């Protein structure tokens, strides 16, 4: 029987990148087994507050039991992080000091709990994070055309032999269980390359499609930035290249002041940066961590910090750079800047 617990990935790196401090307010958008959540709550004690979100009702139920000791400072919500801004508006939870996304699935979901996420455990082909979603993996496999299936497996699974697999799926329909699908893929790919199981990429593709994973990620990142207070941190852990590409591009774009092509003589885009990169290079687990927790092997952590404040208020801070070292009250300039920043945060300024 597989281990039913989930070991949080890059735990110290997450806490460091989020710069968790006592009294801080944090959002964990992917509570899962609650490992990162518990660590954030410990490090933000006393006075810390946390809003935890997960699309899987089962994950929220388990986390509620695990985090009972912190119930006064924690609010756990069964929701999709694609609705992040609405959730925070509803619960009056912004601005915050840090937001974490630890994408993908937890070991509890993968360890064959009858949801159909794993190609190693027999179960109906469901793959929905939340049972209220309409479309299951079986619906896709049994109704899509061969061309549409091949496109899905190629795009979301980055699988080179997608057409062979799609042809076999269509030939063997109806497909009911995970092990049926695993056997079909194994037969379609006669000579597998690399070390991963031949069904890994097809299962990844289906899971991404069923749960609209890439669309949800695209939708939430911008919302997350808008909820961060000045110098608040955004930390994202991804587990495959499609997710990582979205996060990398988003952070790089938001860290630039102008997005005009280099040939444009003057800026016409009027884009101003909202983030500063905290991790110039992606953070990955150490060989020791991978040995201890093989599921961490593909993890990539990226972090960024909120830099701008809204129009006028930010201008005031910027103007401080040009005034003499001491103001008329005798405060040294860094002290003044610090006080202003604190005031902006206290006023709960929202930026977008
Ligand atoms: C890798 S696990 C998180 C593990 C967690 N950090 C821990 O330490 O135990 C990812 C979690 O994100 C959840 N999830 C994935 N996509 C989501 C979405 N769009 N909205 C909310 N939760 C989501 C999954 O249900 C899963 O529980």
Image: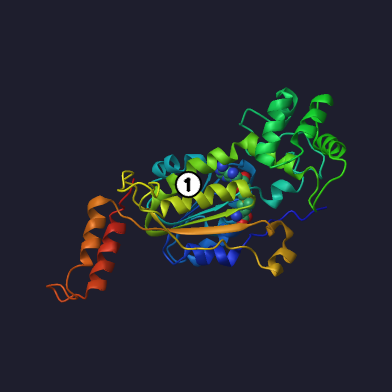
Q: Where residue 13 sits: x, y (%)?
A: 56, 66
Q: Is residue 289 visible?
A: yes
Element on which disc 1 rests: helix
Q: Where residue 45 sits: x, y (%)?
A: 47, 66
Q: Is residue 60 visible?
A: no
Seen from the viewer's position, the closer of residues 237 and 123 is 237
Seen from the viewer's position, the closer of residues 316 and 139 is 316
Residue linked to disc 1: 221
Q: Is residue 22 above or below residue 161?
A: below
Q: Residue at x 21, y 59 (%)?
A: 316
Q: Residue at x 25, y 63 (%)?
A: 340
Q: Where residue 254 sits: x, y (%)?
A: 42, 51
Task: Identify the image quadrant of residue 333.
Answer: bottom left
Q: Residue at x 69, y 37 (%)?
A: 154
Looking at the image, residue 275 sits to the left or right of residue 266; the answer is: right
Seen from the viewer's position, the closer of residues 310 and 264 is 264
In which quadrant will I find the C terminus? top left
Specify few, some or many for label 1: CA neighbours under 10 Å numbering under 14, 14-19, or 20 or more. Answer: many
Number of numbered labels in the structure image: 1
Q: Is residue 197 above or below residue 293?
A: above
- The colour scheme used here is rainbow
Q: Is residue 104 above or below residue 177?
A: below
Task: Identify the image quadrant of residue 345.
Answer: bottom left
Q: Where residue 46 sits: x, y (%)?
A: 45, 66
Looking at the image, residue 298 sits to the left or right of residue 38; the answer is: right
Would the CB of label 1 be found within 8 Å of ligand 1?
no
Q: Residue at x 48, y 39 (%)?
A: 83
């Amino acid at each position: 029987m597989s281990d039913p617990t989930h070991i949080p990935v890059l735990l110290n790196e997450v806490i460091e990148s989020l710069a968790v401090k006592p009294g801080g307010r944090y959002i964990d958008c992917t509570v899962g087994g609650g490992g990162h959540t518990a660590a954030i709550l410990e490090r933000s004690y006393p006075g810390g507050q946390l809003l935890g979100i997960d699309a899987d009702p089962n994950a929220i139920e388990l986390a509620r039991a695990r985090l009972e000791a912190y119930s006064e400072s924690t609010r756990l919500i069964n929701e999709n992080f694609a609705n992040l801004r609405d959730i925070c508006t509803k619960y009056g939870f912004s601005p915050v000091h840090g937001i974490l996304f630890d994408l993908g699935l937890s070991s509890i979901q993968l360890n064959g709990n009858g949801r159909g996420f794993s190609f190693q455990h027999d179960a109906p082909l469901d793959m929905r994070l939340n049972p209220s979603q309409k479309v299951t993996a079986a619906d896709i496999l049994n109704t899509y055309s061969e061309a549409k299936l091949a496109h899905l497996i190629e795009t979301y699974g980055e699988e080179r032999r997608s057409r062979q697999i799609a042809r076999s799926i269509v030939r063997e329909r109806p497909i009911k269980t995970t092990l049926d699908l695993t056997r079909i893929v194994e037969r379609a790919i006669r000579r597998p390359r690399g070390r991963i199981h031949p069904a890994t990429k097809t299962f990844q593709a289906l899971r991404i499609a069923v749960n609209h994973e890439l669309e949800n990620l695209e939708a939430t990142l911008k919302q997350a930035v808008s909820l961060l207070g000045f110098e608040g941190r955004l930390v994202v852990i991804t587990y495959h290249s499609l997710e990582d590409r979205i996060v990398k591009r988003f952070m790089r774009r938001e860290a630039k002041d102008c997005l005009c092509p280099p040939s444009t003589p003057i800026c016409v885009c009027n884009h101003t940066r909202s983030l500063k990169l905290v991790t110039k290079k992606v953070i990955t687990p150490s060989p020791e961590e991978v040995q201890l927790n093989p599921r961490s092997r593909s993890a990539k952590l990226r972090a960024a910090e909120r830099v701008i404040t809204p129009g006028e208020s930010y201008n005031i801070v910027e103007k401080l750079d040009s005034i003499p070292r001491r103001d008329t009250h005798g405060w040294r300039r860094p002290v003044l800047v610090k006080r202003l920043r604190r005031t902006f945060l206290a006023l709960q300024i929202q930026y977008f």
